[in-house]
Image (spheres, rainbow, N blue to C red):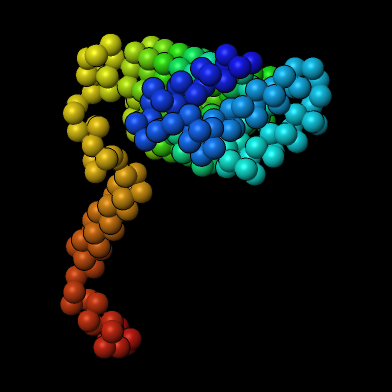
Amino acid sequence: MFGRIKREIHAVFERDPAAKSVIEVLLCYPGLHAILFHRVAHALYKKKFFVTARFLSQISRWLTGIEIHPGAKIGEGLFIDHGSGVVIGETAEIGDNVTIYQGVTLGGTGKEKGKRHPTIGNNVVISSGAKVLGSFQVGENVKIGAGSVVLKPVPPNCTVVGVPGRIVIRDGQKVSPVQDLRHDQLPDPIADMLAQMQNTIEKLEQRVKQLEPAEDILHRESGGGRGD
């Protein structure tokens, strides 16, 4: 147990340059607190003390702002940076040396039973606000960009960005145009739809004018043609 705690503390120093001392890490890092709570809750969950395990996980959530279901399987060296809003589902599995930033969700996509949350490989980085939803595998050494929504399996050694998530780098080689990485050039389907509607309206207006000449419109508006 103490060896695992030491490994968790070492992970903080490896990946957070702001960490100054062991005392600071033990007292001031909610990600570490959440992981330690989870280790105990998960042990209770495996022994079928489900209510006690869930209650302990709720206490951890209240104290840290991080929600980890006691059924989730977490490897060694997980680092949750800041952590507010992180949610990890019951059947999620996380490998070793994974880094998760605030606002990340490892969730499901429905009410199906059984395995419904993702499996995260070793050495994965999941950036702020990313959502990984569904029962599929995210391979080793994957990076998931901030705000991305991942809905399907990701091979190892890839970088994923966007909504829905797209692979932009694989095995060190770019597989999408550079502009796909830019936040100011992400697609906006709502704006595209409104632009298409405006274009359709303009075409309809032009067609109406062609079928109904202006002089006929003025004639009707003046009341003419009633005796015809």
Examine the image and state in which quarter residue 101 appears.
top left
Front-most of residues 150 and 105: 105
Q: Horizontal placement of 164 versus 174: left or right?
A: right
Q: Residue at x 31, y 50 (%)?
A: 191
Picture layout, residue 218 above or below residue 12: below
Q: Horizontal placement of 154 versus 51: left or right?
A: left
Front-most of residues 45 and 163: 45
Regarding residue 89, the answer to whether it shows in the image is no
Q: Position of residue 35 (x, y in %)?
A: 58, 27
Q: Quadrant of the C terminus?
A: bottom left
Front-most of residues 105 and 180: 105
Q: Residue at x 28, y 11 (%)?
A: 171
Q: Position of residue 108 (x, y in %)?
A: 59, 29
Q: Horizontal placement of 117 versus 177: left or right?
A: right
Picture layout, residue 194 above or below residue 88: below
Q: Position of residue 109 (x, y in %)?
A: 58, 31
Examine the image and state in which quarter residue 226 appears.
bottom left
Q: Residue at x 45, y 17 (%)?
A: 97
Front-most of residues 103 and 204: 103
Q: Horizontal placement of 153 versus 227: left or right?
A: right
Q: Position of residue 74 (x, y in %)?
A: 58, 19
- How many numbered tags mark residues here? 0
Q: Quadrant of the N terminus?
A: top right
Picture layout, residue 176 above or below residue 101: above
Regarding residue 212, the answer to whether it shows in the image is yes
Q: Residue at x 65, y 22 (%)?
A: 39
